[in-house]
Amino acid sequence: MKLGNTEIKGKAVLAPMAGVTDRAFRELCMGYGAAYCVSEMVSAKGLIMSDRKTAELLAISDNERPMAIQLFGYEPEVLAQAARIAAQQNPAAIDINMGCPAPKIAGNHSGSALMKDPALCGRIVETVAKAVDIPVTVKIRKGWDSSSVNAVEVARACESAGAQMIAVHGRTREQMYAPPADWDIIAAVKNAVSVPVIGNGDIYSAKDAMMMLEKTGCDLVMVGRGSLGNPWIFREINSQYDLERPVSPPGIYERMTVMNRHIEKLCLYKGENVGMREARKHTAWYMRGIKGAAKLRVMCGELRTLSDMKELTKQALISALDLNE
C-alpha cells in the first residue's frame, strides 16, 4: 500500500513503545521484516524548546525506513511547529499520538485524553497537515472508558481533517493494556473511513495477525508487546504470504546471537553505561521460555557491562541445552 510517496511492503508494523522502540530495536525489527515503524513518542513542546534528549529521538537511519515520527501534545500550533522540525528528518509521516494511557501523558491533556474531544483531534490534524508536506497519521484508542467508546467518531474527524492513515488500539484508556483487545472496534473504524487502517492489540503470533486481518479487514497489523524479545514475529507473519518459504521459530543459538547483536547496538548508540541499563529489560524478554528463565532473569537485572552479557549468554545456553559446565 502507499502512504503519500512511500510504499509499505508487508502487513506488519512495529508499534511505538516509549523506552523500548529506540533506534537499535527498530533497526532489528525492520531487518526481520517489519514493513514500517514509528518512533518513540516525542514531546512537541520539548522539541520546540530545543530539548537535547527530545531532539535525539528524531534520528532516523536508512536501516529503519520507512518510519514515521510520532509527536504528542494537545495544542494544535505547538504540534504544527514541532512537526515542521521533525519533517526535516524526512520521515514517511508525522504521527499524532492520541492513545497513550500513561498518567503523565494523559493527565496533561495529551495522548488518550484527546479522545475526550473529537473536535480538538480534528483541529490538531488539520493544523499539522497544513504545516508539513508529508502525510499526517494518527494513533487512537477505542475510547477513554467504557461509557465513551468513540473511536469511530474520532477517526472520522481525523480523516475529514486530513489524516491519511489511522491506527486503532482496541482498548480504552481505562483498560490500559488489560486483555482483551476489542477487534470489533477496529472493524468498525475500517468500515467508517476510506483511509488505510492499522489494527493494534493482542498480536503475539503470525496466527493472531492473520486472524485480525481477516476479522477486521484492516490494512496492516501493528505489533507491540508481541515483539519484545521476539523480533522474529515479523518474519513469521510475512511467511504466511510466502508459503514456499516457511520459517521455523528461532533456536537458542539464533536467539542468543540476535540478543547480543541487539545489546551491542544499544551500547553503540547510547554508550555502554546507558545501553547496559536498558539491556536489562530486553534481555529478560529474550529469556522467556528458556529452561531456568527465572534464574537467568536475575542475571539480566544485574547486567552492567558487555562482559556480563557473555556470561549471561553462556548460562542461557547451558540451561537451554541442559549442559554441564
Image (cartoon, grey):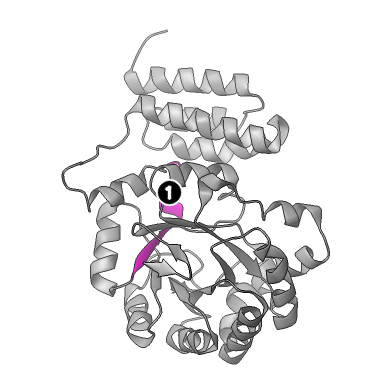
Q: Residues within 10 Å of mark 1 (few under 14, many from 20)?
A: many
The residue closer to the viewer here, 230 or 237, is: 237
Q: Is residue 284 magenta?
A: no
The residue closer to the viewer here, 258 or 145, is: 258
Q: How many marks?
A: 1
Residue extending furthest toward the left? 244
The residue under the point 39% across, 43% down is 32
Q: Is residue 222 magenta?
A: yes
Q: Is residue 207 left or right of residue 201?
A: left
Residue 146's place in the image compared with 95, above or below, is below
Res 35 quadrant in image: bottom left
Q: Is residue 169 left or right of residue 266?
A: left
Q: Tell me the magenta residue range.
A: 219-230
- Mark yes or no: residue 253 visible: yes
Instruction: Check disc 1 and report the residue beneath it.
Output: 227
Res 325 quadrant in image: top left
* Residue 117 spot, x, y in % from top left: 60, 88
* Residue 245 spot, x, y in % from top left: 20, 41
* Residue 203 spot, x, y in % from top left: 35, 58
User: Quarter holding the N terminus?
Assistant: bottom left
